[in-house]
Image (cartoon, helix red, strand yellow):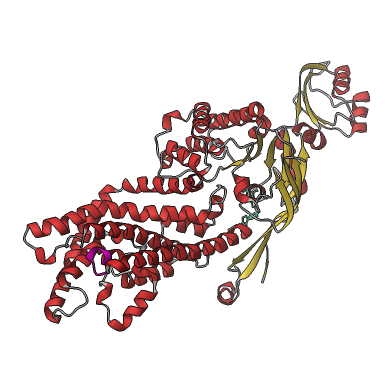
Amino acid sequence: MIRSAARPYLAFFAARFRSQLQYRAAAWAGVVTQIFFGLVSVMVLVAFYRAAGTDAPLTQSQSVSYVWLGQALLLILPFRLDPELREMIQTGDVAYELARPVFLPLSWFARGVADRVAPALLRALPQFAFSMLILPWIGWEEIALVPPASAAAFGLFLVSAVLGSLVAAAIGLIAAATLFWTIAGHGTSILVQTIVWVLSGVSIPLPLYPEWFQPVIRALPFRAMLDTPFQIYLGTTEASAVGGELLMQLFWAVGLFVLAWILIGRGSRRVVVQGG
Amino acid sequence: MALIEVDSICKRYVRRARTTGRGAALRGLFVREKVVTDALSDVSFTIEAGELVGYIGPNGAGKSTTVKLLAGILTPDSGTCRINGLVPWEERREHVARIGVVFGQRTQLWWDLPVIESFDLLADIYRLDRTHYETTRDRLIDRLSIGPFLEQPVRQLSLGQRMRADLAASLLHRPRILFLDEPTIGLDAPGKLAIRDFVRTINAEEGVTVILTTHDMDDIEALSSRLMIINSGRIVADGAPSILTDELARNREVVVDVTPAHGGEARPPEGTLAAALERSRTRWSLEGGRFRFDVDPTVLSVPELIRLVGEQYTMRDISIETAPIEEVVRRIYARTDGGANAPTASS
Ligand SMILES: Nc1ncnc2c1ncn2[C@@H]1O[C@H](COP(=O)(O)OP(=O)(O)OP(=O)(O)O)[C@@H](O)[C@H]1O
Ligand SMILES: [Mg+2]
């Protein structure tokens, strides 16, 4: 019963996942770029730690690991509006999507999740290999990715990363839905990029932001994409708090999806009534 | 109850647009004028199960708008519509699961997926039983000769291949109703023939009800047992093509080559022939021994005309032609061109 209800959406996910896996060449190019960016950020961090001493909320190797994890899972983040959705919404062709017996927000969501999970998976393995194995092997332990706090922590990290992809897909969907009202969509793109860059932890690990800013970070959904799984990996989230953190991610994923659903409903109704 | 019942549907598009003309650039900064198009005005019709209806009209007449309404992807401003007892735009998901629709101008398939994977994905979307699906799919692949490009991504297909794949895709879930909006657009002659043959077959053999829009008169001639003609958002004719022809273009063109009885130039008609032509107001011409008569058979029958010509001339050859459907359609368009749905601007 549930399987039958979920069937179209699982199929959307699978189809999109498979077509994303075709872009292996692009993935390798991405890996090289991200390793380069990772090295630069890590150097900056190390310099910062040398200067600032050791009373930071993360140890140096935790911070460095945080950065490597960010580079490995970078593509989970909703940096880019899905160009096909953008085209469909802007031309009004979205109406044609309604000629299929599916719940549109959920099929787009499934597609968005696949768009994040597949490329991230493709890049994560070589990146882990580089930052966790190759760096120590050539003697650069200081800037290497530390192994997960425990086997359990690693399992929970994977669960949390998947939940993070759901949150990211929902945010991406909301950003796309704003195109029903704005014309060009550049504004939305830039706004989303900026917020995500600053508040997801991918540029600077979130625990390193000043104390007074932490409540803001905790009140917003952006840390649920990368920061939550990373802190579980590093063990900086207490074992007893992990359950709550995962629930929080689930809450954001569902809540943001519902918001996207409402926006898409409103927006597509406009198109359906006015003919785009 | 008929399968499809459409009652007094009106659809108006309101678009905000920049204005043109003097001072428009300046005014455009402050006011966005409303452009109103009445795409459908009071459109009603019913269609019974098993019909094959050709829906034609000039560009911008409202054909695609009608198809979108019937497919549940557009909401009208007023009027009602029931298909299978469902209101398309209110019970959209139930409705679209029971119909097939092809918009010739765009594909419903996925650009980067091979055709076969698009089909599989549709099987999941429509939650089709695996074995039923495979039987239907294989039959469609066979009938539409899709086999050779089954593994190619849709983006690599030629237009004709893509259209056939789209047609197959619209029928995987075995709908009893099929809407086709310009399914032959841009296709070469064999491509059109393949589509026509196929549409005729599923209508005749499987009883699928088909509504098809087109600008191609050969499509109409080959397919439709019923023609609905829309112009400027109003249905202006509805009936069997032969009835429309009889009503609107019943005149026959009769061409007779004659040899003058005494050699030399043929002289103009005289006596009974001249009187009959006069009485029936038949237009005629005579050039180089060839008569052309444009005769209304209800006033002057063709055999009578021939007999009268035979009395005065020696006939060498005769041909009689009915006005082609194209001519009928041209006349209907011309007669009904009210421009009622031409956009009107107001601020
Ligand atoms: N989304 C829209 N916004 C504003 N006006 C529209 C919209 N869609 C269609 N129209 C207008 O409505 C009228 C009917 O359009 P429609 O697409 O139904 O015509 P059609 O009969 O399919 O024409 P064609 O043969 O060119 O495909 C046209 O005047 C068109 O310009
Ligand atoms: Mg059209």
Residue in view at x 60 percent, y 57 percent: A272
On-image quarter of the N terminus of chain B: top right
Residue drawn at the location 32% of the way across and 47% of the way down: A21
Q: Residue at the far left: name it.
A: A139
Is residue B323 shown to the viewer in this render?
Answer: yes
Residue sitting at 54 percent across and 64 percent down?
A: A262
Q: Quadrant of the C terminus of chain B?
A: bottom right
The answer to whether one can see residue B181 in this image is no
Q: In this view, does A99 lie above or below A41?
A: above
Q: Is residue B257 above or below residue A40?
A: above
Q: Left or right? Give the position of A20 relative to A141.
A: right
Q: Where is residue A263 in the image (x, y as percent from the top left)?
A: 52, 64
Question: B250 left or right of B67?
Answer: right
Residue A236 among those drawn in magenta:
yes
Residue stretch rendered in magenta on the structure: A231-237
Q: For this rendering, which residue is in front, B332 or A142?
A: A142
Q: Magenta stretch: residue B35 in it?
A: no
- The reply, left or right, for residue B166 in relation to residue B242 is left
- Number of marks: 0
- Return the x and y of residue A165 as percentages of the image width and height: 36, 59
User: Which residue is more in the foreground, B140 or A259?
Assistant: A259
**What x and y, as percent, mark residue B270?**
90, 25
**At x 16% / y 62%, what residue is drawn?**
A146
Residue extending farthest bottom:
A212
**Residue A95: x, y in percent?**
56, 54
Between A199 and A156, the one nearer to me in the picture: A156
